[in-house]
């Protein structure tokens, strides 16, 4: 589903964020990306949905080289990738329902499909009863559920999340992780950058660890800190 070959990212100021990173993620996998602050996790996530381009190396998404993708092809990639951030990024003046529907309107879904699909994803994240609320009326955990519903509403192949539990308390974080696990079990490939050590350890998923821009370990059923 995702392949990186020799990916290096140097930002315009000369900051080296990633050094010669290579890995493959198969369809249906759940992968954590961990590492200390500044290790390059967010940069790696941004490269996946072409928010940033690598300085060197190649990135493939479903067999297509996205580093060579033309600007007009980017919407096609973004349709196949759902994205979730630490700070939710909901539209404050829209209701929960409208926030999710908007993501479908952007890809020109029919009104009929929107009316069917939005209630379905709201139900999946357990927020049917909050459809008419505005983001400011929701808890952090609820806002992140809305963000998750929005990210999966167009049925993406891959969901990428950058510190999705960064602003949440431990119990709420666990709920969100469990929801990510459910989404993965329905067939979506998950790539999650996380600082939440205990959660990462308890999930027993593949863990890719970055340190100072280098990939230092990649283990199935890995731990946040690799002891070996
Ligand atoms: N737009 C940018 N311009 C210049 N340097 C950047 C930019 N974005 C990130 N960096 C630098 O690249 C390195 C990696 O940053 P990145 O945000 O990917 O790390 P991170 O592992 O996600 O960190 P954190 O856990 O603190 O969010 C850091 O040294 C950072 O200062």
Image: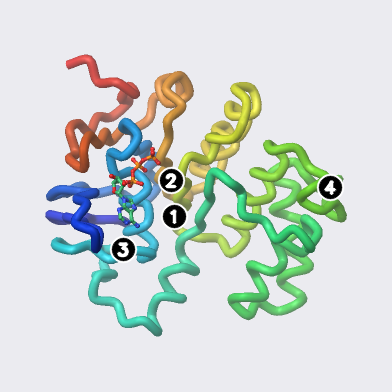
Residue under pointer 2: 190
Judged from the image, the secondary structure of the residue bearing numbered disc 4 is helix
Q: Using the rendered view, name the quadrant where residue 99 is placed.
A: bottom right
Is residue 118 shown to the viewer in this render? Answer: yes
Residue 150, image x, y percentages: 63, 57
Between 117 and 160, the residue placed more toward the observer is 160
Residue under pointer 4: 130
Disc 1 to disc 4, how far (Cα)?
26 Å
Q: Using the rendered view, name the quadrant where residue 165 is placed.
A: top right
Residue under the image location 64 percent in, 22 percent down? 171
Contact? badges 1 and 2 (CB < 8 Å): yes
Residue under pointer 1: 158
Which corner quadrant holds the C terminus?
Answer: top left
Residue 135, image x, y percentages: 76, 50
Q: Earlier in the sequence, mark 2 or mark 4?
A: 4
Disc 3 to disc 1, how far (Cα)?
10 Å
Judged from the image, the secondary structure of the residue bearing numbered disc 3 is strand
Disc 2 to disc 4, how far (Cα)?
26 Å
Residue under the image location 28 percent in, 36 percent down? 208
Residue under pointer 3: 61
Judged from the image, the secondary structure of the residue bearing numbered disc 2 is strand
Q: Earlier in the sequence, mark 3 or mark 4?
A: 3
Q: Earlier in the sequence, mark 3 or mark 1?
A: 3
| Ligand 1 within 8 Å, label 4 CB | no
Residue 172, image x, y percentages: 65, 28
């Amino acid at each position: 589903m995702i392949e990186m070959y020799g990916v290096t990212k140097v930002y315009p100021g000369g900051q080296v964020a990633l050094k010669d990173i290579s890995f493959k993620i198969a369809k249906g996998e759940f992968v954590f990306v961990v590492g200390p602050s500044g290790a390059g996790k967010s940069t790696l996530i941004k490269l996946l949905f072409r928010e940033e381009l690598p300085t060197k190396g190649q990135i493939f998404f479903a067999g297509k080289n996205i580093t060579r993708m033309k600007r007009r092809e980017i919407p096609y990639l973004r349709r196949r990738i759902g994205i979730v951030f630490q700070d939710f990024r909901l539209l404050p003046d829209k209701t929960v329902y409208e926030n999710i529907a908007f993501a479908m309107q952007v890809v020109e879904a029919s009104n009929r499909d929107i009316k069917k699909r939005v209630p379905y994803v709201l139900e999946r994240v357990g927020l049917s009863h909050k459809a008419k609320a505005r983001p400011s009326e929701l808890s952090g955990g609820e806002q992140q559920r809305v963000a998750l519903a929005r990210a999966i509403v167009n049925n993406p192949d891959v969901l990428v999340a950058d510190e999705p539990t960064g602003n949440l308390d431990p119990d709420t974080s666990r709920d969100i992780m469990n929801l990510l696990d459910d989404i993965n079990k329905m067939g979506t490939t998950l790539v999650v950058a996380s600082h939440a050590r205990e959660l990462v350890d308890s999930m027993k998923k593949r863990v890719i660890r970055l340190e100072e821009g280098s990939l230092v370990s990649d283990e199935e059923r890995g731990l946040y800190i690799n002891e070996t």
